[in-house]
Image (cartoon, rainbow, N blue to C red):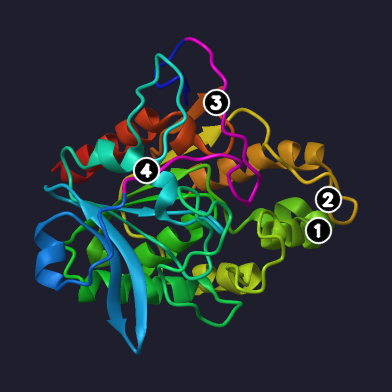
Amino acid sequence: MVVCSRGRCDGAARGRLRRTAGGRALDGRDSGSLGGTRVTGERIAAGAYAGPFDIGGGRQIYLECRGTGAPTVVLISGYHDSADLWSISDSAPPAAAEAVLPGLAGRYRVCAFDRPGTLRYSENQGSVTTRTTPVPMPRTAADVVADLHAMLQAARVPGPYVLTAHSLGGIFARLYAQTYPADVRGLVLVDTFAPEVPALFGPLWPAYRELLDTAGTQRDPNAERIDIDASIGQLQQAPPLRDVPVAVLSKTEPFGGLPPTIPGDLTGADIERIWPQVQTAVVAIRPQTPQTLVTDSDHYIQVHQPDVVISSTDLIVGRAAAP
């Protein structure tokens, strides 16, 4: 277990972007979109692109890709979160200021995307993305995985992939890796959810699930809604994860921005008490999985200390390349 702070293993700082356990940011800045022109898969595979991409069936998914080099790093956001967060940094010195997506693009092909119904941060903050075609809700992890696979194939995004995922995105990344094992070389799991969560929360699980489903969305009927129980079942029934390297990053600070009224008998103290057990379950998915405790960071490690996410991705790329 490594304990890091401000992007290195000493010092102390508190990130300024306050976040909820499953909701939207309370501030943000422009992510530097490259435009919205539809292009061919050949161009996306070769150059920088940010805009809607046609995946068939009358649907488009917003896709942003930059950089060159292999493997391709695919960034998977958490519940309700659009691709914006991977291009936002709210770090404090001595942590490097460069956001995750541009930071990784200096040496890899790196891509991020908007799932339907996810929330924007750099523009019209807290609004549901209009960059990706809406779909009926709720959805499941299998739906997300099918969309991601269709997008990567249609856009000819070159594999193999390292999947760097945040929060509930960890379930999507793990199911993708278990569904398409030949395509995935490693996982970086940033304070992610685990299929053990319902059992760990016990009788508090229905209240926590309601919090996750609604936090930050203002109950917008167009916002993303994931059937978490069904998604956990899909992951548990999928083929086992193959022998790929995994790294886990875990927060040390409380979830920020919890609503004043939490469903049921659930309290913020309950969430903080149980969350380290969730991270222990994530670490246990593969032997020799390093866990980094990112001190002075809340749940949104990729925003507060992006250089730790970048360095962990570098680690997994290196381990995946080892003979």
Q: Nearer the viewer, mark 4 or mark 2?
A: 4
Does 6 sit left or right of 23 as displayed?
left
Does 138 sit left or right of 121 as displayed?
right
Q: Residues within 10 Å of mark 2 (few under 14, many from 20)?
A: some
Segment colored magenta: 11-32
Label 2: which secondary element: loop
Give coordinates of residue 283: x percent, y percent.
Answer: 49, 42
- Measure how far apart labels 3 and 4 are at the Cα level: 16 Å
**Amino acid bearing label 1:** Ala
- Which residue is labeled 4 in the image? 87
- Which residue is labeled 1 in the image? 207
Compared to 200, does 316 lie above or below? above
Label 3: which secondary element: loop
Label 1: which secondary element: helix
Q: Residue at x 38, y 29 (%)?
A: 308
Q: Which mark is residue 15?
A: 3
Quadrant the C terminus occupies: top left
Compared to 152, does 173 lie above or below? above
- Measure how far apart labels 3 and 2 are at the Cα level: 24 Å
Contact (CB < 8 A) between labels 1 and 2?
Answer: yes
**Amino acid bearing label 4:** Ser
- Measure how far apart labels 4 and 2 are at the Cα level: 30 Å
Contact (CB < 8 A) between labels 4 and 2?
Answer: no
Tell which circle, 1 or 2, labels the residue nearer the N-terminal end: 1
- Which residue is labeled 2 in the image? 262
How many discs appear?
Answer: 4
- Measure how far apart labels 1 and 4 are at the Cα level: 32 Å
Q: Which mark is residue 84?
A: none
Q: Nearer the viewer, residue 118 or 183?
A: 118
Tell which circle, 4 or 2, labels the residue nearer the N-terminal end: 4
Give coordinates of residue 12: x percent, y percent.
Answer: 53, 13
Q: Nearer the viewer, residue 118 or 72?
A: 118
